[in-house]
Amino acid sequence: MGSFEENILVCKTKSSAEQDQFRTRYNAMTKERDQLWVERDNFQAKVSVVEQHTQQRWRYYNSNFYFISTEMKTWEGSREDCVRRGADLVVINSREKYVFIHGLSKETFWIGLTDRVEEGIWKWVDGTALTTGYWGRGQPNNQNGMEEDCAARWSDLSTTDNGWHDAPCNELHFWICEKMA
């Protein structure tokens, strides 16, 4: 009889160990499923934001949205419009971004660069100093002694000079806003 009781005890022990192992796997899979649901919800929220912005003429690139204006304003008026949109004038701090922004429009447009605070010290609207510039030939130049304290990506179809120019901030140009996605 002892052998029979030992077999029952062994079966109960195995059954208990298998249940523990099953429970552990089940809990791990439940946790993984819940994490996947969170990731799915986050992804769907991002897709919704992208869809909403693209319907409002925003372009998506490298984790940022870019708005290309269809009207002209002064540099300050352009910046105010960007701020109303939860953005600011575009900051161009890499060659890749320069190429992308350059391809958005063939028009002359304001960028978020100015030397209003201190002449000759160009700063971006986010407060960072200009480290790499894509100035047009002979720029910046304060042409004819004018106060040209705001930067624009210039589009001169008669030449190949489509770099940045300093310009009077009260000129009217198109603009590009930028905000993080």
Image: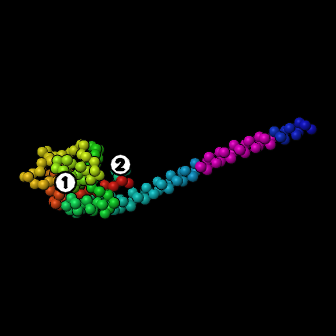
Point 59% across, 49% down: residue = 31
Point 25% across, 59% down: residue = 79
Name above or below for residue 102 compared with residue 10: below
Residue lying at the far right in this picture: please name it: 1
Q: Give the structural element (helix, strand or loop) at label 1.
A: loop
Residue lying at the far front in this picture: please name it: 118
Gap between marks 2 and 1, in whole Å?
Answer: 29 Å
In the rendering, which numbered label is found on residue 149? none
Point 32% across, 58% down: residue = 87
The main secondary structure of the magenta stretch is helix
Image coords of residue 8 (percent x, y): 84, 41
Q: Amino acid at mark 1?
A: Arg
Queried whether the magenta region covers residue 163, the answer comes back as: no
Image coords of residue 97 (percent x, y): 29, 47
Image coords of residue 93 (percent x, y): 28, 46
Q: Which residues are magenta?
A: 11-31
Q: Give the structural element (helix, strand or loop) at label 2.
A: loop
Residue to which mark 1 is pinned: 116
Q: Nearer the viewer, residue 160 or 65?
A: 65
Name above or below for residue 7 compared with residue 123: above
Residue to which mark 2 is pinned: 62
Is 122 placed left or right of 19 in the picture?
left
Q: Nearer the viewer, residue 87 or 163?
A: 87
Colour option used:
rainbow
